Image (cartoon, helix red, strand yellow):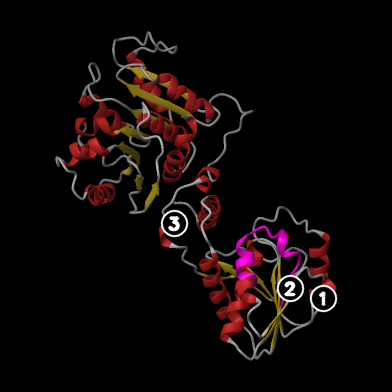
Amino acid sequence: MIDDKIRSKILNENFTFYGIDLEKYYIKAGVKFSEKIIESSKKINTISIICGLGGNGADGIATAIALAKGNKDLEINTYLIGRSNLVEEPVINLLLAKLVKLKNINFIQDAYAKDIENSDVIIESLVGTGLKGEKLNKRFRDVIKKISHYKKPIIALDVNTPHYKPKNVISINYPKTEDAEVIGINYPGEYEMIVGPGDVNALKKPNSSSHKSKNGNMLVIKEDSGGFEIVKNFSKNYLVKNKLFAFNQRYLTKSKENVDIRDLEISLEMNDSIMLLDTEYSIISKASLEYILSEFCNKTYVINGDIIDYLDIEKIRNVENKVLILDRKDLVNMFKDSKASNGEGKLKRFSIENNFHIVLIGSQSILYSPEGEVKTHRSSNIYSPNYKLKLSSLIASFATRNNLWLSIRAGVFEVDKYF
């Protein structure tokens, strides 16, 4: 499973990439923050909220709005430490347009430390988890130095800046510091389903200076060596060492490996990800394939949908990590339904019941995990030749050293870049 910290980072990157309006999300977070602040504070008349120019600053502004609307007698001083035309998150300006209309908010933009007044409670929302190291710009350092000398309690939103210890940290979805209180925020549901660059950036990156197989080993089992250049290009891109077994004759004369078929079991033992491609195996039998899946069930398999009817599902159910890549034609064949009616619902059940990750390729690719999670991506090149081969290759490359569900999501998003 992908932990909450990585999941949150993935979603934020994807939202930014797709230009999704996050104003509603921040407003919702602001309400949760404000409720926790009021709940954890004694009687208060004034609050100072200090905001930076990024996402954490947007949290602070949204909290100010929620506090002002819910507590009409509360005096709220809100400080933007920097000019609003330099904000890093465009949503800040949308939130500021709402904030300046509220009568019980005193707003100062382009503020400095000297502008900040003491209050019953001070809210700090200068920087978030994107801060690298402990280096703050001078204006932020001056602000922290001033408020840390106030005797009133300081509450940090999501994560505190370095060089002071707040009374409390209130974090979103997972604790950013050891003693943080956590509030749960549901991202907009339809947006959670979209895969994007956040999934790609969450992958473990190979070390280009490392030796031998670098990011892992990948084995391709195919009826012939056609298309192997595609596989090699993808695996090279991710620094994965690959090997092809092409069962069109006893020896692999078309492959640089020239490996005898009898070496197959040795290669299975040595490889991390295994691709099973094509339908009509002229030499390797159905029984041999099922033997491989049974004896080497600890491997990660990427299976082209063309061969799903060739295998006994019961025989491969115990393979822990496996992904099936289908198109609509495979879906029809799979369920023996000429119209594939309600095929997507059937696939979700099939995925859960048989412990399969599935990618259904179409005008919108749909991804299913064995845990019932569903993701989507609008495919742009599904009619390109060898699309399934390219997608299979990319997923198998990513999966050698990564969480399989993350590898699938990243592969589906990335594959269009290689056409």
Q: Amino acid at mark 1?
A: Asp
Which residue type does callout 2 highlight? Tyr
Does residue 183 belong to the magenta stretch?
Answer: no
Which residues make up the magenta segment?
Answer: 78-96
Q: Is residue 380 visible?
A: yes
Residue at 72% from the left image edge and 61% from the top image edge = 85
In the depicted view, which residue is nearer to us: 330 or 256?
Answer: 330
The residue wearing badge 1 is: 115
Badge 3 element: helix
User: Residue, x 21% and y 26% (percent of image)?
Assistant: 286
Q: Position of residue 122 (x, y in %)?
A: 71, 78
Could you tell me residue 213's position as x and y percent?
Answer: 53, 26
The numbered dot on residue 79 is 2
- Where does the image place residue 178, in percent across and percent down from the top left? 62, 65
Task: Name the mark on residue 192.
Answer: 3
* SS class, disc 1: helix
- What's under tag 3, amino acid-wise? Glu
Nearer the observer, 19 or 118: 19
Give the Cα separation between the discs numbered 2 and 1.
8 Å
